[in-house]
Amino acid sequence: MTSNAMNQGRSFGPLQLRDRSVAALLALGMLLAAACTAIAYWPGLMTWDAARQYGQAIDGDFDDWHPPAMEWLWRQLIPIHDGLQPMLILQLALYWGGFALLAGWALREGRRGLAAAIAAGGLMPLAMALMGAVLKDCLMAGALLSAAGLLFWCDGEGRWQAWLLRTLGIALLLFAATLRFNAFLAAVPLFVALLPVAWRSSWRRMTVAAIVATALLMLALPLANRAIGAKSSGVELSLIIFDLGGITEQSGVNAFPPMGVADPVKANHACYSPVKWDPYSFWVDPVCPLGFDPMKAAVETQKIKPYRFWLGAIVAHPIAYAEHRLRHFNINTRFLVHDEIERPVQAESAPNDWNYKVAPNPLLSAIDWLALASAKTPLGWPIAWIALASGLLMLSPALPSRRLIVPMALSALLYGLGYGVFSVAAELRYHLWTMIAALIAAVLAAGDLYAMPAVPWRKTGWAGTPLIAVLVLATAWRALPLG
C-alpha cells in the first residue's frame, strides 16, 4: 500500500480550506512554542563551550577544540548583533523550521492528525530546554531536522524543484557534519535518502552511495577546519586518553606511553571515571599525571602517532577496552543506572567575560521542571530511543511510509550507537538528535498503523520487543536497592 493509496487518489495541489485552517493553527502553535523558548532563555543560555566559542568568534583566532565552523559562522553574525541572540534564533529557526516542513508535508498528504502529531513532537520538554542553550549539538540537530524536512518534500515535486530540495538538504547535512566529528553517523542515512532513486535503486548502488556519502561527510569537518585556518588543539587526545585510562583500569596493565609516573596503574585509578574523561583534562585541579598536558608532551617528544598507539592498545587489550566502553555506554545511555548522572539540562549560564546570563522567569522554570521530570522517565533514557529506533527498522518493511521511516530510524540508531565508541562524556545533550529522529519515525509509523485497514500485529509485536526489553530491564534495575 502506498501513501497515495491511503489517501484514495487525493490531489496534492493547493491545500483545501480546512487544511489551510489546520496549517495556520499549526504554524501559529509552532511559532508560539519557538517564542516561548526564546523568551524563557533569552538572550540564550551560555554554556562553558559557548563561552570559549564566542571568545574565538570575537577575536577570529580559531582552534579546533570546538567546531570552528560554528565559531566562524558566529563571527559573521556579530556585525548583525553581538552576543548569543543570533545563534539562539538560528537554532530555533532550524529546529522549528524542520518541524514545520514535516508537518506541512503531512498536510500535503492529507493527513491532518499526523501533521498535528509531528508538530507536537517539537514540544518534547528536554528538546525545548536544550534548544534554549547555545550548543553545537542543538545547532546540529536543527540542521539535520531541516534536512529531513526537505527530504520529505522531494517526492511529488517537479524535477528542478526536487533537485533544489535535495541540494539544500545535502548542504545542511554537510554543515551538520562540520559541527561534530561523529555527525556523519546521523547524516549518512539522510544523505543517501536525498539522492535520486536511480542512484540507489539496487544494493550495489546503495552501497556505493553510502560509501561516498560517508567519505564526504567525514571530510567535511577537517576540510572546514583547514579552510577556516583553525589551529590544532589536540582535542583528539581526549578520546584516546579516556580509552587508554579505561584499558588501564580494566586490565590492571599500563596502556599509556612512558610519562615518568612511578606507578601509572595506581595513578590512573585515581583519575579514571567511567562517566567522563574530564578528570584527565587540563582544567581540573589537581592535574592528573597521565592527563592531557602530560600525554600531549609525550606524544610530541616521543614522536608517537596517537591513533596508531590507541589502536595498538585496543588490539592488545580488547576485553578491557570492551569492558570500559560498555560501562561508559551504559551510563551514557542511562540504561542500568540508579542515580542521576548529572543535571539533564542547564538552567543558568556559565560565568563569562561578557556577563551574559538568563534572568530567572516563570516560563524558564516551567520548561526546566518539565525537562527534569521527563528525564526521570524513559523519555530521558537514550537507550529507550535507541531500542525504539531498532524496532521501527524491523517494522518498516510493512509500512507505507518506509521510504521516510527507514532513514529517520537508521539515523537515530547509528548516531545513538556511535556513542558506544566515540564518547568521552555522558551529557544528555549528545542524544538530542537520536531522541528527535526516533520520535519522528515513531509518529510516522503510528500514523501508518492507524490508517492501515489491517494492522500487522505479529510484526508490530516483534518490533516492540527491543523497547519492551529495555524498559523492563532499566525499570527493574532502578527499583533494586543500592549496594
Image: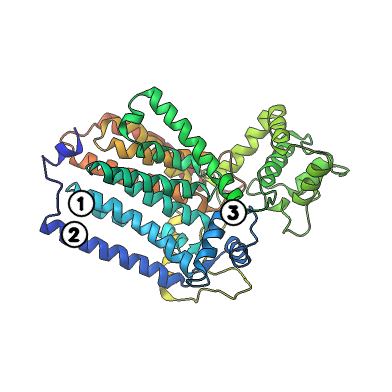
Q: Amino acid at mark 1?
A: Leu
Counting from the top left corner in percent of width and height, residue 389 is at 39, 39
Question: CB atoms at circles 3 and 2 under 8 Å apart?
Answer: no
Q: Upstream in the sequence, badge 1 or badge 2?
A: 2
- What residue is rendered at 65% in x and 44% in y? 239
Alpha carbons under labels 3 and 2: distance apart: 44 Å
Q: Upstream in the sequence, badge 3 or badge 1?
A: 1
Return the mark for residue 22: 2
Question: CB atoms at circles 3 and 1 under 8 Å apart?
Answer: no
Compared to 283, does 148 lie above or below?
A: above
Would you say 144 lies left or right of 14 here? right
Question: CB atoms at circles 1 and 2 under 8 Å apart?
Answer: yes
Q: Amino acid at mark 3?
A: Ile
Q: Is residue 467 visible?
A: no
Q: Determine whether the residue tagged by mark 3 lies in a helix, strand or loop.
A: helix
Alpha carbons under labels 1 and 2: distance apart: 8 Å
Residue that mark 1 sits on: 107
Compared to 166, does 78 lie above or below?
A: below
Q: Determine whether the residue tagged by mark 2 lies in a helix, strand or loop.
A: helix
Would you say 436 lies left or right of 339 here? left
Counting from the top left corner in percent of width and height, residue 241 is at 71, 43
Q: Which label lies toward us, 3 or 2?
A: 3
- Quadrant in the picture for the N terminus: top left
Q: Residues within 10 Å of mark 3 (few under 14, many from 20)?
A: some
| Viewer-side residue, 360 vs 234 | 234
Compared to 61, does 113 lie above or below?
A: above
Residue that mark 3 sits on: 228
Q: Residues within 10 Å of mark 1 (few under 14, many from 20)?
A: many
